[in-house]
Image (cartoon, rainbow, N blue to C red):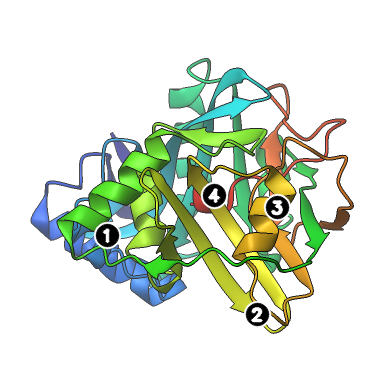
């Protein structure tokens, strides 16, 4: 498929992961636009079949992209197949030529009827762009629990360069989050994007097998981005046993099953859009997309 603009012919490509030239060009554009380095994720085996760039190529270089992330979620026990759009970018030299519009229209046409719903996260500069394609605003709710640290669980940091630690993390993920009402399923690739990248220093395991946790401390707040696998205590006790002295509140990177605890709630910090007419997990519900599912 070709797209023509300003006397130039752009080629539409979707198979770029295994094409070294286009893959490196895609990586370069992501670094230029978002300062985002996909190379460690790719080299670590994280780029799997669920992440699908849809690109326009000019003279052998990727100049625009909209990526499709095929997502499975378990929402209150019900499976949902969603599409998350991401890595929406255009090289500065080719802006104003309708490339992003062409890609958005093409992606929505290709994936129409193949999922329960479509959503994306947007930055401040493009809030007026996505409604042109039928997207509407939605609001996440993040949950915070007052902390009462007690009998702290001894944790060790995971090193994903060690095969045993990588296996431990993946096995815990396959057991899901027992405390989450809205969990990402069947997406080890996206988990590895975080584990090999922004959350690499925040991966921990308790002394027993089949469990892992992603924890990040920020002042007197402990962010529990994800709890995976088997945990012997009830939810509130588990969280408080993960907190060190001096922690006053615990922020969750997921939607808790038990919302009868003393949670305070805050709007999500990212701009969320869902495609009208499809599944909207947030209509009438307080939910938060799992932190490890943001692509």
Distance CA(mark 2)–CA(mark 4): 18 Å
Q: Which residue is mark 4?
A: 227
Q: Secondary structure at mark 1?
A: helix
Nearer to me, 265 or 57: 265
Callout 4 secondary element: strand
Comes first in the chain, label 4 or label 3:
4
Instruction: Check disc 2 and report the residue beneath it.
Output: 218
**Viewer-side label of 2, 3:** 3
Sequence order check, earlier mark of 2 and 3:
2
Q: Quadrant of the N terminus?
A: top left
Q: Which residue is mark 3?
A: 237
Q: What residue does disc 1 label?
A: 41
Residue 273 visible, this angle: yes
Q: Residue at x 38, y 34 (%)?
A: 174
Q: Is residue 199 visible?
A: no
Q: Nearer the viewer, mark 4 or mark 1?
A: 4
Percent of width and height locating residue 227: 54, 49
**For this view, does 122 lie left or right of residue 249?**
left
Looking at the image, tell me whether mark 1 or mark 2 is earlier in sequence order: 1
Q: Residue at x 24, y 66 (%)?
A: 40
Nearest to N terminus: mark 2 or mark 4: 2
Residue 92 located left or right of residue 25: right
Which sits in the foreground, 189 or 221?
A: 221
Question: Mark 4 or mark 3, which is nearer to you?
Answer: 3
Q: Secondary structure at mark 3?
A: helix
Distance between the alpha carbons at the discs numbered 4 and 1: 22 Å
Looking at the picture, does residue 243 appear above or below residue 213?
below
Real-space Cα distance between discs 1 and 2? 25 Å
* Towards the viewer: 108 or 97: 108
Q: Report the Cα–Cα distance between label 1 and label 3.
A: 34 Å
Q: Could you say where residue 22 lies in the image, as x and y percent from the top left? A: 18, 56
């Amino acid at each position: 498929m070709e797209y023509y603009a300003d006397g130039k012919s752009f080629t539409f490509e979707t198979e770029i992961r295994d094409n070294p030239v286009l893959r490196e060009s895609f990586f370069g554009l992501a670094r230029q636009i978002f300062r985002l380095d996909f190379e460690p994720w790719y080299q670590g085996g994280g780029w799997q079949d669920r992440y699908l760039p849809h690109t326009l190529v000019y003279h052998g270089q990727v100049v625009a992209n909209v990526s499709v992330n095929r997502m499975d979620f378990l929402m209150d026990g019900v499976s949902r197949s969603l599409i998350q759009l991401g890595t929406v970018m255009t090289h500065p030299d080719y802006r104003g030529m309708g490339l992003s519009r062409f890609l958005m229209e093409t992606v929505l046409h290709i994936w129409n009827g193949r999922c329960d719903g479509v959503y994306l996260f947007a930055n401040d500069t493009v809030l007026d762009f996505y409604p042109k394609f039928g997207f509407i605003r939605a609001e996440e709710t993040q949950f915070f629990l007052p902390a009462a640290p007690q009998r702290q669980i001894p944790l060790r940091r995971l090193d994903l360069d060690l095969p045993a630690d990588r296996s431990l993390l993946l096995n815990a993920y396959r057991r899901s989050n027992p405390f989450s009402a809205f969990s990402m399923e069947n997406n080890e690739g996206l988990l590895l994007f975080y584990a090999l990248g922004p959350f690499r220093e925040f991966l921990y395991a308790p002394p027993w097998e089949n469990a892992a946790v992603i924890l990040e401390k920020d002042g007197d707040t402990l962010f529990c981005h994800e709890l995976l696998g088997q945990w012997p205590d009830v939810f509130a006790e588990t969280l408080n046993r993960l907190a060190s002295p001096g922690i006053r509140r615990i922020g969750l990177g997921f939607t808790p099953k038990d919302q009868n605890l003393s949670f305070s709630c805050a709007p999500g910090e990212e701009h969320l859009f869902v495609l009208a007419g499809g599944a909207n997990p947030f209509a009438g519900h307080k939910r938060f997309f799992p932190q490890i599912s943001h692509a």
